[in-house]
Image (cartoon, rainbow, N blue to C red):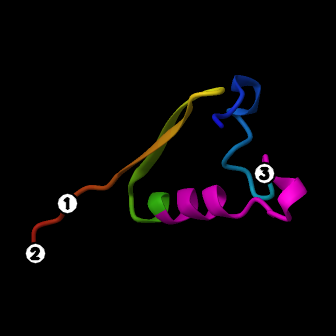
Amino acid sequence: MGIAPEKFNEIFQLGFTTKSDRGNIGLGLWLTKLQVEGLGGVLKFDSSPNKGSEFTVTLQAHKS
């Protein structure tokens, strides 16, 4: 639970996972960041080892 501070610079890289022992391939956060930024948004996170992680997506609202 939570992400170690020394991994903060890696978590949005394609292939990064903390769960390789479970067969995960590290696609989710990379893909999410790519999509959010493609929409002009920002993906931020806060994480504490042994406590958990919180991810925040911020997108601009456009008037139609």
Indicate which disc, 1 or 3, sits on the residue closer to the N terminus. Answer: 3
SS assignment at label 2: loop
User: Pointer 1: what residue?
Assistant: 61
Q: Which residues are magenta?
A: 17-35
The quadrant the N terminus occupies is top right
Task: Indicate the position of residue 17 as horizontal and vertical percent values.
Answer: 78, 51
User: Pointer 2: what residue?
Assistant: 64
Q: Residue at x 80, y 52 (%)?
A: 19
* Residue 58 among those drawn in magenta: no
Indicate which disc, 3 or 2, sits on the residue closer to the N terminus. Answer: 3
| Amino acid type, mark 2 | Ser
Give the distance between the C-alpha atoms of the residues marked 1 and 3, in whole angstroms: 32 Å
Pointers 2 and 1 in contact (C-beta within 8 Å): no
Crowd band around label 2 with a 10 angstrom C-alpha radius: few (<14), some (14–19), many (20+): few
Residue 48 got which mark?
none
Q: Is residue 20 above or below residue 45?
A: below
The quadrant the C terminus occupies is bottom left
| Amino acid type, mark 3 | Thr
User: Pointer 3: what residue?
Assistant: 17
